[in-house]
């Protein structure tokens, strides 16, 4: 690597007449000194600058040493970008660090294992969202796996310890394997109805290897068959959760040496036990669904995938998902342990917490939250109602939006030792109980599962293609920061809603939008950094709303961060602009006079068939621009470059665009500012503006439609680019609305 850097610099020096000896190792130590100083200062910009110098030295790390020198600065740069609200860049840095850590671990450096999972979780924290969701009434927008006991749409919900058919349609019952019979808990089953889902938590009481071995060997078959015979008499839907939270059993190997010795044996024995139970269940009651249900956070040496028994034995994949207030108080944004466990001021995020399991299995199996709860009182005095309420609200608000694969949610409605979770029933926390009822009653997916409401649930906005009276939108935007997030919705350049309270909802009636193409811009702001999401919403005459990306994914010539992106998105969404090909927009290509008149005609919504004449000698019949030129001439928008010519293929200048805009506004009775301007406020190149265009230029300037190019220059005779024209039209549209 060092030789490659030196060779490059030698060639560079030869080409440009400068020769600088700058060996890779020496440049690393220079950057390393600055990096250490930056860490001591704590200034995120200095940390990023120094870390990026190291990244430049090792842009293509080739050996152990280079990866060792690179990974930590990349992680610290990720933390620094996080503090600045530049979460996409933070995620890129964490990915770079992870690549080096994976390399080192695979090369035999086992100490690096401890960083693998935390870096993956840091990537999730900084790369999830923002994302926009819409309520949908179309079942095809909801994942459906045709699994046992799975409904095509909707999310069932309920709890242990209580059942109220007016609010819930699922019931959780815990039974200890070996020691208890399921029939012994029949008193917990709802009376007078079979219309619910019964989830049996069939837990292995001692959570140890020997019990799994016995089950796998058939030594508990009599006990299993006896319980299955009872379940076969029930008419409700049944799900069996066997061997819950296997990935964090206390009996699992807890150090690297023990893991190497017994880890695989434990995995294989659990799989064998689960498969044996599953086979017996299918033999006795084929319609019952089997749940493989790990915990959302694993023992350090295992993953949920390790214990997975296989698709043919598993109908649903579940997980435990709790969110309790941590007893630690030294939370820091640069703490990877907090990130891994999803706790603390910056990283407490239940959606990230469950993401691993949903993303690992949600492509082929429905997901169930087999138990989850929010402790509001504990022996150590840490837990409180305020934290429990906020955690509950966040999870129930977002889980069915972000992960529609989640088709059932069970709440842990009981007290465990000195920890209180109960929210329904005698002695429960009434405040949390009321909040729970409110959350499920306002969730489209859960209400659909109860047979109420019009919606099936939530879907990515880009799936919307259905007849509806309104776009009912919300945004997921949760970042590792204490700062508030603001979400702003703008339709066709006009802000219609702004919110700083999740889920940042906005309902847009289709009648309000009107038939046609519309530009929807959603701006998510956090720590002063804007993330803009652009969509095209097309409303048909029968109120069908179809949403696509304003700039198609196929267009690849608009660079990230380009100043004209929003305007281009506006132009393409509203149909004023098309791409120059399926993959290009050519934002910096000059626009012709014929093109801009066509854009104005599209903006006015003219019918080309109404204009069949030949307005100028150089606008031939049959050319794409001729009807638009005739329209523009007929309404006084253009006069031509002479009495007989228009020069449709000549490039249009900035002052000519201003002239056409003002004439069009006059034709449509659109009020713009006047063109009066003090001499001191004139453009520095005022004398270069053509006399015919002078008043038009300043009318447009005073109306906020055009700005100078820097140093107070207007550059009136410069040819306007497609990006500039799109920007002008977007600003003009804002005035017209």
Image (tube, grey):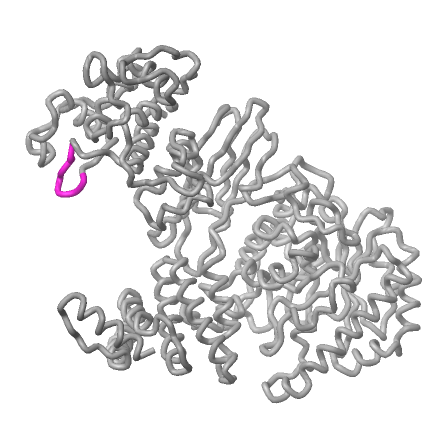
Question: Which image quarter is the C terminus in?
Answer: top left
Question: Which image quarter is the N terminus in?
Answer: bottom left
In depth, the one of 49 and 556 nearer the eye is 556
Main secondary structure along the magenta-highlighted residues = loop
Tell me how many marks there are.
0
Apparent side of residue 142 relative to residue 325 in the rendered image (left or right): right
Relative image position of residue 502 (x, y in whole percent):
49, 48
The answer to if 347 sits in the magenta stretch is no
In depth, the one of 730 and 660 nearer the eye is 660
Eyeballing the image, is 258 above or below 277?
Answer: below
Apparent side of residue 427 relative to residue 204 in the rendered image (left or right): left
Relative image position of residue 244 (x, y in whole percent):
72, 69
Tell me which segment is drawn in magenta: 709-716
Q: Quadrant of residue 656?
A: top left
Q: Quadrant of residue 479?
A: bottom left
The answer to if 713 sits in the magenta stretch is yes
Relative image position of residue 545 (x, y in whole percent):
55, 31
Apparent side of residue 104 relative to residue 2 in the rendered image (left or right): right
- Residue visible at 26% across and 68% down? 46
- Residue visible at 52% across and 43% down? 474
Relative image position of residue 62 (x, y in whole percent):
40, 77
Apparent side of residue 312 relative to residue 615 in the rendered image (left or right): right
């Amino acid at each position: 690597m060092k030789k490659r850097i030196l060779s490059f610099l030698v060639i560079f020096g030869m080409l440009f007449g400068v020769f600088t000896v700058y060996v890779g190792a020496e440049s690393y130590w220079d950057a390393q000194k600055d990096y250490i100083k930056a860490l001591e200062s704590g200034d995120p910009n200095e940390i990023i600058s120094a870390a990026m110098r190291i990244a430049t030295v090792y842009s293509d790390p080739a050996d152990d040493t280079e990866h060792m020198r690179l990974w930590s600065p990349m992680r610290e740069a990720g933390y620094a970008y996080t503090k600045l609200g530049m979460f996409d860049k933070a995620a890129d840095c964490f990915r770079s660090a992870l690549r080096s850590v994976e390399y080192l671990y695979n090369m035999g450096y086992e100490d690096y294992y401890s960083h693998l999972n935390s870096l993956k979780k840091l990537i999730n924290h900084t790369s999830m969202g923002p994302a926009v969701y819409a309520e949908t009434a179309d079942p095809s927008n909801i994942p459906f796996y045709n699994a046992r006991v799975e409904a095509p749409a909707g999310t069932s919900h309920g709890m242990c310890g209580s059942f109220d058919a007016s609010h819930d349609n699922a019931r959780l019952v815990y039974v200890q394997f070996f020691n208890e019979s399921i029939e012994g808990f029949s008193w917990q089953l709802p009376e007078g109805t079979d219309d619910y889902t019964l989830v049996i938590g069939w837990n292995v009481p001692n959570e140890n290897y020997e019990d799994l071995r016995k089950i796998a060997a058939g030594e508990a078959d009599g006990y299993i068959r006896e319980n299955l015979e009872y379940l076969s008499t029930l008419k409700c839907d049944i799900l069996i959760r066997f061997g819950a939270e296997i990935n964090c059993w206390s009996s699992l190997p807890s150090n690297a040496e023990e893991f190497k010795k017994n880890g695989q044996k434990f995995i294989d024995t659990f799989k064998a036990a689960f498969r044996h139970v599953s086979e017996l269940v299918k033999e006795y009651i084929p319609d019952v669904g089997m749940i493989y249900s790990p915990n959302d956070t694993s023992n350090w040496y295992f993953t949920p995938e390790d214990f997975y028994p296989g698709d043919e034995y598993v109908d649903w994949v579940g997980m435990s998902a709790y969110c309790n207030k941590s007893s630690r108080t030294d939370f820091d944004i640069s703490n990877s342990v907090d990130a891994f466990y999803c706790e603390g001021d910056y990283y407490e995020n239940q959606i990230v917490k469950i993401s691993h399991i949903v993303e690992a299995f949600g492509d082929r199996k429905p997901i169930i939250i087999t138990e989850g709860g929010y402790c509001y009182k504990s022996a150590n005095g840490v837990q409180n109602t305020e934290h429990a309420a906020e955690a509950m609200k966040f999870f129930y608000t977002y889980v069915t939006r972000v992960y529609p694969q989640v088709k059932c949610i069970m709440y842990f409605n009981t007290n465990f030792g000195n920890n209180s979770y109960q929210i329904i029933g005698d002695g429960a926390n009434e405040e949390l109980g009321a909040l729970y009822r409110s959350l499920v009653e306002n969730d489209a997916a859960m209400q659909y599962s109860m047979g109420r409401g019009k919606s099936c649930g939530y879907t990515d906005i880009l799936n919307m293609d259905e007849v509806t009276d309104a776009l009912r939108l919300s945004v997921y935007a949760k970042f590792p920061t204490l700062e508030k997030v603001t979400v702003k919705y703008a339709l066709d350049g006009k802000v219609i809603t702004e919110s700083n309270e999740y889920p940042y909802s906005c309902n847009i009636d289709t009648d309000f939008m009107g038939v046609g193409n519309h530009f929807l811009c959603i701006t998510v702001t956090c720590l002063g950094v804007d993330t803009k999401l652009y969509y095209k919403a097309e409303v048909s005459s029968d109120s069908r709303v179809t949403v696509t990306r304003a700039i198609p994914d196929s267009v690849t010539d608009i660079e990230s961060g380009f100043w004209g992106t929003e305007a281009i998105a506006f132009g393409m969404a509203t149909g004023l602009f098309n791409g120059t090909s399926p993959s290009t927009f050519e934002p910096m290509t000059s626009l012709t006079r014929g093109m801009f008149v066509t854009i104005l005609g599209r903006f006015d919504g003219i019918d080309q068939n109404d204009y069949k004449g030949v307005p100028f000698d150089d606008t031939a019949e049959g050319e794409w621009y001729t009807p638009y030129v005739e329209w523009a001439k007929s309404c006084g928008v253009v006069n031509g470059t002479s009495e007989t010519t228009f020069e449709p293929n000549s490039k249009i200048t900035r002052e000519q665009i201003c002239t056409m805009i003002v004439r069009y506004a006059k034709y449509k009775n659109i009020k713009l500012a006047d063109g009066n301007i003090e001499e001191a406020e004139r453009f520095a190149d005022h004398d270069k503006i053509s006399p015919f265009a002078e008043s038009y230029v300043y009318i447009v300037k005073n109306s906020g439609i055009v700005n100078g190019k820097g140093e107070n220059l207007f550059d009136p005779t410069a040819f306007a680019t497609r990006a500039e024209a799109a920007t002008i039209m977007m600003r003009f549209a804002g005035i017209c609305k």
